[in-house]
Amino acid sequence: KNLSNSGIIEQIKNLDKAIELAREKNKKAKGISILDFDDTVAKTKSKVIVYAPAFKPGTSKEVSMRLTPAEFAKRHAELERMGASFDFSEFNKVIKGKKGPLFDKLQKAVDKFGNENVFILTARPKESAEAIQAFLEGMGVKLKIENIAGLEDGRPIAKAQFIVNKAAEGYNDFYFADDIMANVKAVKRVLDIVDVKSNVQQALASKNLSKDINKMIEYSTGIGREKTYSA
């Protein structure tokens, strides 16, 4: 989203402050864990409804599409430039939610450190925080509502700026996880600039390695992937 001059100045100030804090000698370690929600902590059926101009001469009709969280993150900026509008009414809910690839990572962080410095950072709107909190509690993880940050923005720079703001608050040991590589790269870039301790991870869905290995064996040896052999 476009920023005012004051907003840009504030971002630059936060970056300068974060770098200054990171350079302090004898600073105390202050850790923070920040995880994306969709396809990272959880898998859901929630989608963003997009209304985009049809771009046909002589018509003002709009066409609609439904995007998954991953599709929204990848296409948000492009669609916004096209003049699209977004309906987050469904995205404010956790529909058919289940554990994602790094749910256990979130749970372990809360169990070990408490919920004070553990955050969910999502492209969903801030209005989705209550639904996300309820889903997590139903799964046994209690997270503070103020620690569920909805950006309503799918661009990598939005998540990177959130990280900079946290560094400006004095956090100097970061764990960040997201399923979108562009977000991972953007966050790693700013953490490298700020020069703080960090562990940045891309969340990947688990694969059936047995099936993958069987396919490779079939390709290289001709032995059918469905066959089972004794010792």
Image: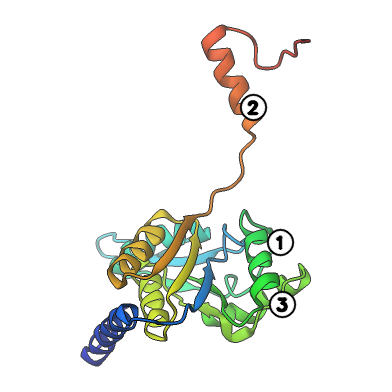
Which amino acid lies under the numbered mark 2 shown in the image of this protein?
Lys
Of residues 97 and 24, which is closer to you in this image? Answer: 24
| Residue 118 screen position, x and y as percent | 58, 75
Residue at 35% of width from left, 76% of height from top? 161
Q: Position of residue 89 (x, y in %)?
A: 57, 75
Q: Nearer the viewer, mark 2 or mark 1?
A: 2
Q: Would residue 105 be found to the left or right of residue 58 on screen?
A: right
- Which of the two discs, 3 and 2, labels the residue nearer the N terminus? 3
Q: Secondary structure at mark 3?
A: loop
Q: What's the residue at 60%, 80% (across, down)?
A: 129
In the displayed structure, 30 sits above or below 62; it is: below
Quadrant where the C terminus sits is top right
Residue at the spot x=52%, y=11% of the render? 220
Q: Residues within 10 Å of mark 3 (few under 14, many from 20)?
A: some
SS class of the residue under badge 1?
loop
Amino acid of disc 1: Lys
**Which residue is denoted by mark 1 in the rendering?**
96
The amino acid type of the residue labelled 3 equals: Lys
Residue at numbered disc 3 = 142
Badge 1: how crowded within 10 Å, few (<14), some, or many (20+)?
A: few
Relative side of 225 to 22, left or right: right
State which mark lies toward you, 3 or 2.
3
Identify which residue, 225 or 30, lies in the foreground: 30
Question: Quarter-wise, where is residue 15 in the image?
Answer: bottom left
Distance from disc 2 to disc 1, alpha carbons, whole Å, reads: 27 Å
Mark seen at residue 211: 2
